[in-house]
Image (cartoon, rainbow, N blue to C red):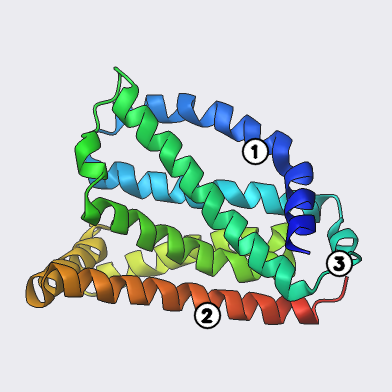
Amino acid sequence: MTRLLITYEWLHNRKIFWRLLAIMPLYFIWMSNSIPETRVFLFITALMCSFLPFTLLLREDKFKAQGLICSMPVKRRQVIQLRYGVLWLAALVFLLVVLAVVLLSPLSRVNGASLLTVGGLFYFLCLSTLIIAVLYPFSVYFGAMGFIIVLVAFQFLGVGLQALILALGYGPDLKTIPRAIAAFLQSSHAALGGPLYYSALFIAVVLVNAVSLFISIRLFEKKEL
């Protein structure tokens, strides 16, 4: 059954996947030259590598083809589990493309060695996990509209955070909250030490993914096609 699902996903998405792989290096060559700061570059990379895989899955909603895969001799749980794996595999493939661009492109101004550190990879892992974990359940149940709902919600959240920062007297500096989060993580790293800190972070990543997967399975099992 797993092989059948993998074959279906590959035949359905292979063209758009190869197109994305062809376009991404050009975009990140430009970006690695325009944004040399490692953390900012990693942030944008995590966003792109998390958003792009959804273009593979949302095409099915566009063509109203969910009924087709559910007519196969597979369980809905298996469909969701495989697609969660597809999201992460595609995100990691896109990350490898980005790393290749940074390390090989003569135009890159990003420090490639800093991207390959444990901290850099965990930064990418945590941010990508959060994005996929939030977007996935909405996309499973609402399709492309769920993706749009979350993006709009993020816009309102940004406005709300800005209003909160202004109300607390910090002025219009939107970096206040990210700096506070960064300071908390740095203090946690100093207090726990490297091995314990990264172990706790890894456990948190696994739990977030597990909750997201559980919710997505329940939503898809109850969804009427």
Is residue 114 shown to the viewer in this render? Answer: yes
Depth check: give the residue in front, 14 or 19.
14
Secondary element under disc 3, as helix, strand or loop, is: helix
Q: Is residue 140 above or below residue 110?
A: below
Q: Quadrant of residue 169?
A: bottom left
The amino acid at mark 3 is: Cys
Please tell me which residue is depicted at 88% across the width and 68% down the height of the picture.
Answer: 73
Q: Is residue 74 above or below residue 35?
A: below
Residue found at the far left of this picture: 190
The amino acid at mark 1 is: Phe
| Callout 1–callout 3 Cβ contact below 8 Å | no
Q: Position of residue 6 (x, y in %)?
A: 72, 53
Image quarter in which the C terminus is found: bottom right
Q: Is residue 181 left or right of residue 69?
A: left
Q: Is residue 29 left or right of residue 59?
A: left
Give the CA distance from mark 2 to mark 3. 23 Å
Residue found at the far top of this picture: 106
Depth check: give the residue in front, 1 or 206.
1
Please tell me which residue is depicted at 20% across the width and 42% down the height of the picture.
Answer: 114
The disc, 1 or 2, on the residue closer to the chain's N-terminal end is 1
The disc, 2 or 3, on the residue closer to the chain's N-terminal end is 3
Depth check: give the residue in front, 10 or 204.
10
The amino acid at mark 2 is: Val
**Label at residue 211:** 2
Quickly name the residue at label 3: 70
Give the CA distance from mark 1 to mark 2. 27 Å
Q: Position of residue 101 (x, y in %)?
A: 38, 28
Secondary element under disc 2, as helix, strand or loop, is: helix
Q: Is residue 76 left or right of residue 197?
A: right
Q: Is residue 128 above or below residue 11?
A: below
**Label at residue 17:** 1
